[in-house]
Image (tube, helix red, strand yellow):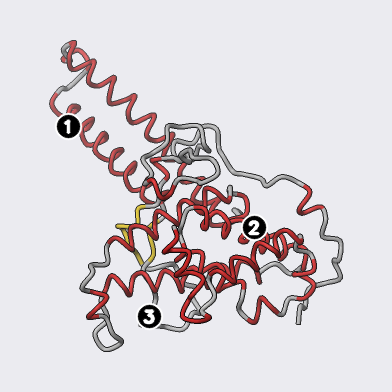
Amino acid sequence: MDTSGDDSDCGPYFDSPLLTISPPDSPNIKMFDVSPIPIPSNMVLPEQRTYINIVPEGCVDPNILIPPFLEEDSEPSDHVPRIPRSPLITSFASLSEKLQTANDMMIEMGTQHKGPEEYTDDNAEAVQHLCSTISSTQATLGKVNNLIHLASTTTDITSFSSYLVAYQLTLIESTLFQRIPPEALLTHSPRTPHPSIVASTDFFNYLTRIIEVSILSPTEASHRAQTLNYWAKIAARLYELNNFQTLKAVLSATGTPPIQRLKRTWACIPKKTLTRLESLTELMSEKDNYERYRETMVNG
């Protein structure tokens, strides 16, 4: 049963354009205004036949997997999945190291010369360069730190473009998939699990739970519908990117009993979105051993 308040007016949330967060002076987050990175031909949008522009510096690196942050009251578990490290955390660590190196070099130069009068022209230029590096790195580090704080306190995932989220998820999924050797499919079993397959299934389950929580967290049906509609958009983008693994994770989340029981929430979803979700759900149905999905894969 949907326990949210009486908020049958759902219209405003779907009439306004989707907001995006794009700090104009951030070194890592700039939306669709940079050169595209290479994308495999099977990941080109079929109706556009153009590459999706993405931020190289802002890409999640799926090769760096870390345990997720858990609430203090969470029950201990031996099955906590390892997830890709946040690019903001990666940038913060890299900038901190750069700043420390510059400071160490400045200290070293200071101990070699007692005063400015002992600096040669070359030394003076080096000191000026170090000062500039330290100043700019400190400024950038402060901005990244602010973004980390913002992301951990107020940022809603629906603030980001559905294309951006779908593409980042596809980058992660693609790398996890490529790390699975063919022989692992023959030897993997509950008793002898292969780490690469476990990493893939863990990320699938982790993402499914994240989607569920994001939909169930709002207290009002209209707000829940806004998030549900957003994930439906991402599902469509994942299909366009031929990312069926993550698509299945999204559909698994929206198809769970806690989500399906939200009657007033579903009543706020546009008919076009409902039709799209039904079509994708039929495609990824387990009926007849994923017959529709296998036909799609064979027919390209």
Q: Amino acid at mark 2?
A: Tyr
Q: Position of residue 25 (x, y in %)?
A: 51, 32
Percent of width and height locating residue 54: 46, 41
Which corner quadrant of the image does residue 37 belong to? top left
Q: Is residue 256 left or right of residue 28?
A: right
Residue 230 tag number: 2
Spatial CA distance of label 2 from label 3 is: 29 Å
Mark 2 or mark 3, which has the lower sequence index? 3
Q: CA distance from mark 1 to mark 2?
A: 53 Å
Q: 281 or 92, which lies in front?
A: 281
Say if 176 sits above or below 54 in the image.
below
| Of pointers 1 and 3, the one earlier in the residue sequence | 3
Q: In which quadrant of the rendered image does the C terminus lie? A: bottom left
Q: Which of the two marks, 2 or 3, is nearer to us in this view? A: 2
Tell me if 100 is positioned left or right of 17 in this view: left
Quarter occupied by residue 225 = bottom right
| 3D distance between C-alphas at marks 1 and 3 | 47 Å
Residue 96: % across, % down: 33, 44
Query: Which secondary structure lies at badge 3?
Result: loop
Relative depth, front residue between 181 and 139: 181
Asked which secondary structure carries label 2, the reply is helix
Within 10 Å of disc 1 (Cα), the crowding (few <14, some 14-19, many 20+) is: few
